[in-house]
Amino acid sequence: MDNQISVLGLLRKARDLVEAGRHACVIEAIGAFKAEAAGQKRDMAYYAVLETANNARSESGMTVLAEASRDMTAALLNATSERITSKMH
């Protein structure tokens, strides 16, 4: 198992799956990388998305991860990636 993927890389790959229509929710999209990212890394990605949702004052909790529309999921993954990237610079 190659656990070298970063949380940011995982979020971007998950967004790509959502945009391609392969998965519609955050949980499925991030979970699809079980072989590429350890559970701790996937958990960090889930929490990062939850933090973004909470910061935006949108619905919070597991509901936003599991039941958001595909467009909302892609936007949330994008916003999370942008939030993390902005903290790096």
Image (cartoon, rainbow, N blue to C red):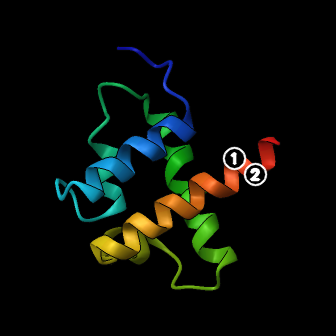
- The answer to whether 51 appears left or right of 42 in the picture is right
Q: Where does label 1 land, which residue?
A: 85
Closer-to-camera residue (25/63): 25
- The answer to whether 32 appears left or right of 63 in the picture is left
Q: Where does label 2 land, which residue?
A: 86
* Label 1 secondary element: helix
- The answer to whether 58 appears left or right of 1 in the picture is right
Look at the numbered discs 2 and 1 and tell me whether their residues touch, using CB distance below 8 Å. Answer: yes
Neighbor class of circle 1 (other Cα within 10 Å; few <14, some 14-19, many 20+) is few
- Image position, residue 39 (x, y; %): 43, 35
Q: Residue 35 occupies which quadrant of the picture?
A: top left
Note whether 61 is above or below 10 in the view shown: below
Q: Amino acid at mark 1?
A: Thr
- The answer to whether 40 appears left or right of 57 in the picture is left
- Image position, residue 34 (x, y; %): 31, 33
Note whether 66 is above or below 15 in the view shown: below
- Quarter occupied by the C terminus: top right
**Separation (CA) of disc 2 from disc 1:** 4 Å
Q: Residue at x 33, y 48 (%)?
A: 16
* Label 2 secondary element: helix
Closer-to-camera residue (77/59): 77
- Quarter occupied by the N terminus: top left
Q: Residue 37 occupies which quadrant of the picture?
A: top left
Q: Is residue 28 visible?
A: no
Q: Amino acid at mark 2?
A: Ser
Q: Residue at x 26, y 41 (%)?
A: 32
Note whether 32 is above or below 4 in the view shown: below
Neighbor class of circle 2 (other Cα within 10 Å; few <14, some 14-19, many 20+) is few
